[in-house]
Amino acid sequence: MAAHTNSGSSKNAGSGVTYDVVIRGGRVIDPESGLDGVRNVGIVGDQILAVSEADLIGLREIDARGLVVAPGFIDLHSHGQGVGECRLQSLDGVTTALELEAGVAPVSVAYTRAAMEGRPINYGYSASWASLRMHVIGGAPLSGGASGPLDGLGSDAWRAPASPAQSAALMHMLERELVDGALGIGILLGYAPATDPAEYVGVAKLAAAAGVPTFTHARPLIEQDPGVVIDGAEELTRVAGQTGAHMHYCHINSTSTRHLDRVQALVEAVRAEGATMTSEA
């Protein structure tokens, strides 16, 4: 829903305007403007035309006293992409559910299927590094996430080292996915922790050149697996600084566990140096 808001009294309020819907007396929270206060919201069609302390008149009125009125929530990390899952998300106030950590491939198939099935909320996908690796190295078919975005993770075939030809094919397919509408690149690196670090750098460089984010399930920390190829947090933060890509650190709390203070300090350090990093819990 498009919004034209005013944190005080709307110019339309009290001027004889009758709105299609008025949400009355709720605690309106708008992160973009910083508004947090009791307001009345006037809606015409699919547009918010007034957010006002003044009284508003509506053909339909919703009493929101004691409730919070806010923009729809965006879930960046939603593996449940069916119609039923989206309906449940909407009951929690989620209006956009995105599959960005695991991603799907091909995204064109996923978008076509979602459009045909219909979705009660907005949707979107990243390009799945893991799925494309399963295809290029493991020979698995590409389903566009039809059997689930995490399908096939237990197979060892896709974790094998990539030959130069396979690496080139993987990068070409990722680039194609971005052209076809992928919102970024989802990288389940933690499920293939022996992958050559140079491959991860290459994927990040591709994302940086395309101006899209990466969404990484990092390798284990050195404290968790002393034999890991490279510490997951140090790799992610270093690659952010090295490539200039926007690196999103998926579920930073659950992969860092008791070492979160060290990991967060690395993230804050590269941010201070100008790197673009985001994270989620």
Image: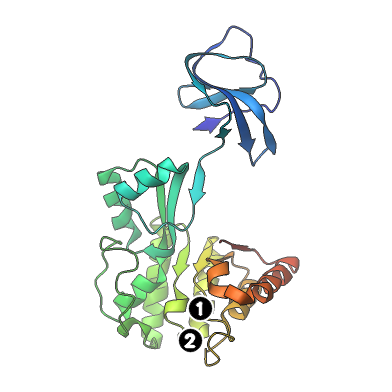
- Mark 1 secondary-structure assignment: helix
Type of the residue with mark 2: Asp
Q: How crowded is mark 2: few (under 14 residues within 10 Å), some or many (20 or more)?
A: some
Using the rendered image of the protein, determine whether residue 242 is visible from the camera's viewpoint.
no
On the picture, is 87 further left or further right than 196?
left
Q: In this view, does 205 lie above or below 220?
A: above
Residue wearing tag 1: 200
As drawn, which residue projects farthest toward the bottom? 227
How far across and down, in percent of the image, does residue 85 sit? Answer: 34, 50
Q: Answer few, some or many: residues within 10 Å of disc 1's Cα (few below 14, many 20 plus, some between 14 and 19).
A: some
Circle 2 SS class: loop
Q: In this view, does 129 lie to the left or right of 72?
A: left
User: Could you tell me which residue is drawn at 39 percent across and 42 percent down?
Assistant: 121
18 shown above or below 232: above
Residue 120 horizontal side relative to residue 73, left or right: left
Inter-mark Cα distance, 1 to 2:
7 Å
Vertical side of 158 occupied by 108: above or below: above
- Residue at 26% in and 60% down: 146
Amino acid residing under circle 1: Tyr
x and y percentages locating residue 25 in the rendered image:
60, 23
Quadrant housing the C terminus? bottom right
Q: Which residue occupies 43% across, 66% down?
A: 175
* Mark sitting on residue 196: 2
Residue 266 occupies quadrant: bottom right
- Report if residue 218 is visible in the image: yes
Could you tell me which residue is drawn at 59 percent across and 86 percent down? 223
- Asked whether the residues under the numbered discs 1 and 2 touch, taking CB atoms below 8 Å apart as contact, a structural biologist would say yes
Which percent across, then down, holds residue 187? 46, 71
The image shows residue 184 at horizontal and vertical percentages of 48, 61
Q: Which mark is residue 266?
A: none
Q: Which of 178 and 276 is in front in this view?
A: 276
Snapshot quadrant of residue 56: top right
